[in-house]
Image (cartoon, helix red, strand yellow):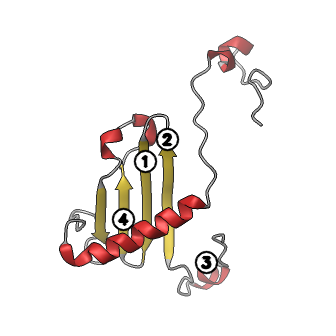
Amino acid sequence: DTDSLNMWRTLSTSSPSPRKQIILNIDQDSVEDTWSAGIIRGKWKLIWGQDYLLKQEIPEMKNEVQLYNLDEDPYEEYDLSRERRLRKKLRKLKTIIKTAQRQMVTADYPKKDERGYPANFGGFLSTGWCDAKV
């Protein structure tokens, strides 16, 4: 199941988009125990996990959720994630993210390796210094 919608008509004639949702991000670093995901579906936007780049390593945010009604709050100032009446909406968006995550390849976050620094190659980027992944 891939995200393949023909957007040409929307782009060329300003017709309504066939897209009903956009998964903004799904990113997990199991080594540092960090997680970040985001989705917009209709008027709703969910941010799940840390809302900064994972390389900032804020593992205590991995269970945080933020929910916004973009029609009523386009600047995302009022987090609705604690609203009891929206629990079903929150679960639905989380389920969509979890389903999409199962279809993804695990991200590769290699540790810093000074063998690849351009300074080792006269200031140029170079290949062939790292071990192949199999």
Kindly report which numbered mark, 3 or 1, lies closer to the viewer in this rendering. 1
Q: Quadrant of the C terminus?
A: top right
Number of numbered markers: 4
Q: Mark 4 or mark 1: which comes first in sequence?
A: 1
> How far is the residue under mark 3 from the one under mark 1?
33 Å
Q: Quadrant of the N terminus?
A: bottom right
Give the labeled residue for mark 3: 11
Circle 3 residues within 10 Å: few <14, some 14–19, many ≥20: few
| Amino acid type for the residue under numbered disc 4 | Leu
- Residue contact between numbered discs 1 and 2, judged by CB atoms under 8 Å: yes
Residue at 49% across / 40% down in the picture? 30
Does 31 sit above or below residue 63? Answer: above
At label 2, counting other C-alpha atoms closer than 10 Å, the crowd grade (few under 14, some 14-19, many 20 or more) is: some
- Where does label 2 land, which residue? 29
Q: Is residue 19 visible?
A: yes
Q: Judging from the image, what secondary structure is the residue with disc 1 in? A: strand
Q: Are marks 4 and 1 in contact (CB under 8 Å)?
A: no
In the image, which is nearer the foreground, mark 3 or mark 2? 2
Are dots 4 and 3 in contact, CB under 8 Å? no
Query: Which element is circle 3 on?
Result: helix
- Answer above or below: position of 121 versus 33: above
